Image (tube, rainbow, N blue to C red):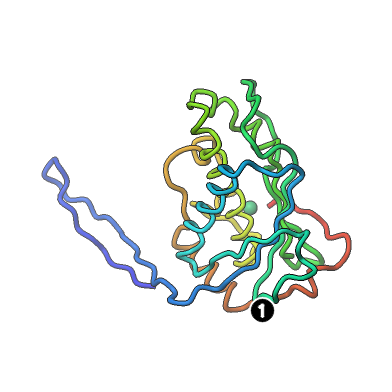
């Protein structure tokens, strides 16, 4: 990682010190076999946007993703790193209605005896409830891409927990709670601490898949 300070002249004749981090890009990213299981298959536009956002967030941390279906797991090639993501409910943007959102956790990752497992769950129905009011004003053709991007952010949060191997939170993608604005607007990325935790976790862990398939893992919302 490299970092440097950048001195910028502000408009009112005072100086603003901005801190800019440039993270060294891994020349050879780690490929994660990401097995997905959907209660209902998402529209292509949602899936594409989710995949793009997850890669945009995690590529600077040195990860790329080989998206696979759990249905094909029996004859899939071996992988260095594996994660499983299950998506519950409707992962589309049809039949949106406006109501007060109080959805509960949007995603959670499983732990067993204090060890973070490579299993994560995302609740599309809760995410829909949370974002409906914010998406209603969008033209319908844009909703799928925006919802898919939000799904990618929720998934990236859980992938952070898995590969940083931590239950701790911070800011950026690793913040403990997302607002509607966090999920629908702007850019959401790993911050410096999140990147450091990812680096430490990736260099410490080594394919704990065999341990992770222990039956009946406990789900924790973190
Ligand atoms: Zn969390």
Which residue in the structure is indicated by mark 1? 206
In the image: residue 197, left or right of residue 127: left
Question: Does 210 appear above or below 160?
Answer: below
Q: Nearer the viewer, residue 20 or 145?
A: 145
Judge by depth and name the residue closer to the eye, 205 or 146.
146
Left or right of 129? Residue 215 is: right
Residue depicted at 27% across the width and 55% down the height: 18
Q: Is residue 135 left or right of residue 121?
A: left
Q: Nearer the viewer, residue 21 or 93?
A: 93
Residue at image x 80%, y 73%?
A: 211
Neighbor class of circle 1 (other Cα within 10 Å; few <14, some 14-19, many 20+) is few
**Figure label count:** 1
Residue lying furthest left: 13
The location of residue 194, given as percent across then percent down, is 51, 61
- Spot occupied by residue 29 in the image (x, y as percentages of width and height): 50, 73
Q: Quadrant of the N terminus?
A: bottom left
Using the rendered view, name the quadrant where residue 198 is placed.
Answer: bottom right
Q: Is residue 55 above or below residue 122?
A: below
Residue extending farthest to the top is 98
Estimate the x, y position of residue 219 in percent, counting from the top left.
79, 54
110 w.r.t. 143: above or below: below
Q: Quadrant of residue 67?
A: bottom right
**Disc 1 on helix, strand or loop?**
loop
Residue located farthest toward the right when viewing the structure as drawn: 215
Seen at 68% across and 61% down, the residue is 68
Residue lying at 26% horizontally and 63% vertically, measured from the top left: 5
Q: Please state the horizontal and vertical placement of residue 132, each as a whole percent of the image.
A: 60, 28
Q: Any atom of ligand 1 within 8 Å of the CB at mark 1? A: no
């Amino acid at each position: 990682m490299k970092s440097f300070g950048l001195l910028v002249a502000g408009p009112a004749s005072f100086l603003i010190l901005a801190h800019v981090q440039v993270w060294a890009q891994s020349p050879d990213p780690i490929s994660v076999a990401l097995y997905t299981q959907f209660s209902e298959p998402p529209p292509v536009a949602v899936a594409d946007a989710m995949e793009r956002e997850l890669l945009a967030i995690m590529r600077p941390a040195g990860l790329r993703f080989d998206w696979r279906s759990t249905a094909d797991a029996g004859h899939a090639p071996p992988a260095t790193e594996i994660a499983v993501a299950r998506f519950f409910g409707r992962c589309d943007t049809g039949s949106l209605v406006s109501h007060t959102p109080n959805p509960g956790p949007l995603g959670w990752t499983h732990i067993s005896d204090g060890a973070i497992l490579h299993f994560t769950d995302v609740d599309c129905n809760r995410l829909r409830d949370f974002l409906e009011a914010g998406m209603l004003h969008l033209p319908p053709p844009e909703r799928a891409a925006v919802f898919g991007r939000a799904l990618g952010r929720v998934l990236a949060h859980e992938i952070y927990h898995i590969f940083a191997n931590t239950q701790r939170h911070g800011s950026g993608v690793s913040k403990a709670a997302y607002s509607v604005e966090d999920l629908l607007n702007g850019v959401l990325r790993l911050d410096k601490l999140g990147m450091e935790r990812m680096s430490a976790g990736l260099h410490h862990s080594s394919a704990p898949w065999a341990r992770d398939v222990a039956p009946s893992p406990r789900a924790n919302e973190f």
